[in-house]
Image: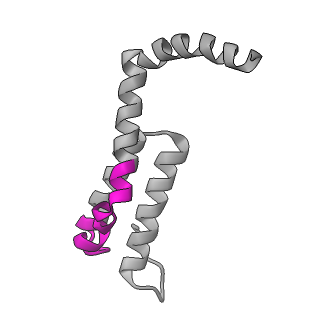
Amino acid sequence: MLFPLANQPVSFSYSAGVVLITLTCWSASLLPPFLTGLIFFALSIILQLIEPNLLFSGFGSTAVWLIISGFIIGSAISSSGLDKRLASIIAPISRLVILV
């Protein structure tokens, strides 16, 4: 990113730099994954690598929101301890069903 490659447009070097920064942060866990994703989005828009409406077009899909809401609900269930309470109720019942 600091030293653009010869025979390549500057946007190519910027894109390579943004991808390298993102992959490094994700693989080395330098930052939380959500923050790394936000930095990727921010750098892509600031450096004008892609149009914002194209960058965020995937968020218009209902499937994406279904997955995001599933993560949120799953996190809430784990944080509240509801998962352990339900497992303690269901486990004895499932043992009876298997024996029969």
Which image quadrant for residue 43? Answer: bottom left
In-image side of 52 versus 32 (left or right):
left
Estimate the x, y position of residue 59 in percent, counting from the top left: 30, 60
Residue 95 visible to the viewer: yes
**The magenta stretch spans residue 20:** no
Q: Is residue 65 above or below residue 72?
A: below
Given residues 69 and 16, the one toward you in this image is 69
In-image side of 89 versus 91 (left or right):
left
Q: Which residue sits furthest bottom?
A: 7
Estimate the x, y position of residue 6 in percent, counting from the top left: 48, 84
Q: Quadrant of the N terminus?
A: bottom left
Q: Quadrant of the C terminus?
A: top right
Given residues 42 and 92, the one toward you in this image is 92
Given residues 66 and 43, the one toward you in this image is 66
Given residues 34 and 97, the one toward you in this image is 97
**The magenta stretch spans residue 62:** yes
Q: Which residues are magenta?
A: 45-66
Estimate the x, y position of residue 7 in percent, counting from the top left: 48, 89
Which image quadrant for residue 48? Answer: bottom left
